Image: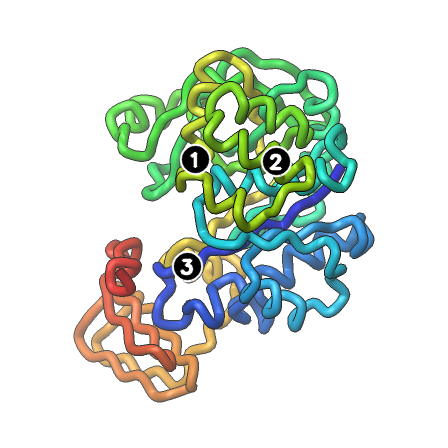
Amino acid sequence: MIPVIICGGVGTKMWPLSSPRLPKHFLPLVKGKSLFELNWETLRKRFQPSEIYLQTNAEQAEIAKKLVPEIVTDNVFIEPEARNQGPATGLAAALLIKKGMGDEPFFLIQVDNLRVPGENIFKMMDLAEKLGKETHKYITGGFLPDRVIKGVDFLLKGEFQSELEGVKIFKVAEYLDRNEENKINDNLTSGKLLVHANHTCMTPNDLLKMYEEYRPDWYKPLRLIADGGDVVSEFTKMPKGAIEEITKQVHAKGNSLVIELPFEWTDFGTWESLEKYYKTNNIEAKKGEVTEIEAKDNFCMSDNKKKIAIIGVNNLIVVEGDDGILICRKDLSGRVGEVVS
């Protein structure tokens, strides 16, 4: 199994602290450590630095190596520019093939997520490796939601396949885009609805075969990269696009499997999601001095430990940083990226 940590976004929904010079997954958000460091530390409980790969852009690679000096430089794959997850996932596969590891399953670790208990990711990895080698299908992950979660896509569980050490595997009956709200609501209590939590796993050779079938315009440059072609010139030939442009078709043809996550999965997508994580795990925010008068349920954070005073308002996010000050309702924290745009 080849673990590949993938990161490259900025996390604009967590402005004003997250920025291109220090994206959210490098911020010390959890007990003084970043999401990148925490995910690396989890993988190090099984893998040596020489066995862990990182895919990102040149700027973030430098930040990552400062935080984790033991990263092996030859194991860092650089994306020449941002072209979204479709080309990025394909690049990871192509570069692994170039290194002679085309038949060894790889497992993508999204760095802006946390898994608790973290060690349970190894149960999933072991199972995904077995399934990847035996079935040659696209392997992904999901979990049963207790409410409708905004900003994520969903899968409907199909036929039960098997169970290993309490971890269940299903065929994927249907992919539901986040905008298909009626279908999502109709299936919320059915026991079949899963939040699509990614964790892509396949052999690099199988992934490129999938690209060849469904996105030949991505496949051709990737094939050239795998065969030793220039990464910069070939990667930039690929149109931008999400990997779902392929996987939707794969799901529809019954060529995918979903593993129910054997851990609690938290996606740090917004300030509201971070606050919920803090509350659940009894973690104090880096607040600075906060005074509230006739106010409650507000989340306050000052990167510079400035005093924050709130009077007569509830359920707000207030964050102060070098790039600005954010004040918004908690239920609108998903729109913070519009400020950056």
Using the image, tell me which numbered label, if any, was put on residue 11: 3
Using the image, tell me which numbered label, if any, was put on residue 145: 1
* Percent coordinates x, y for residue 153 in the rendering: 39, 34
The correct choice, above or below, for 278 with respect to 321 in the image is: above
Q: Which residue is drawn at 54% across and 23% down?
A: 212
Residue 226's quadrant in the figure? top right
Q: Residue at x 73, y 22 (%)?
A: 133
Q: Distance between the residues labelled 3 and 2?
A: 31 Å
The correct choice, above or below, for 133 with respect to 40 in the image is: above
Image depth: mark 1 or mark 3 in front: 3
Q: Relative to residue 318, is residue 1 drawn left or right?
A: right
Using a 10 Å C-alpha cutoff, classify the residue at mark 2 as few (fewer than 14 neighbours), some (14 to 19) or many (20 or more).
some
Q: Relative to residue 257, is residue 276 drawn left or right?
A: left
Task: Give 88 or 43, whichever is nearer the viewer.
Answer: 88
Residue 309's quadrant in the figure? bottom left
The correct choice, above or below, for 135 with respect to 177 in the image is: above
Task: Give 251 or 63, whichever is nearer the viewer.
Answer: 63
- Marks 1 and 3, the one that precedes in the sequence: 3
Using a 10 Å C-alpha cutoff, classify the residue at mark 1 as few (fewer than 14 neighbours), some (14 to 19) or many (20 or more).
some
- Marks 1 and 2, the one that precedes in the sequence: 1
Task: Give 218 or 242, whichever is nearer the viewer.
Answer: 218
Q: Relative to residue 340, is residue 113 drawn left or right?
A: right
Amino acid type, label 2: Leu
Q: How far apart are marks 1 and 2 (CA)?
A: 41 Å
- Marks 3 and 2, the one that precedes in the sequence: 3
Q: How far apart are marks 1 and 3 (CA)?
A: 23 Å
Q: Is mark 1 on a helix, strand or loop?
A: loop
Using a 10 Å C-alpha cutoff, classify the residue at mark 3 as few (fewer than 14 neighbours), some (14 to 19) or many (20 or more).
many
Amino acid type, label 1: Pro
Q: Are marks 3 and 2 in contact (CB under 8 Å)?
A: no
* Percent coordinates x, y for residue 61 in the rendering: 60, 63
Which part of the image, by quadrant, shows the C terminus?
bottom left
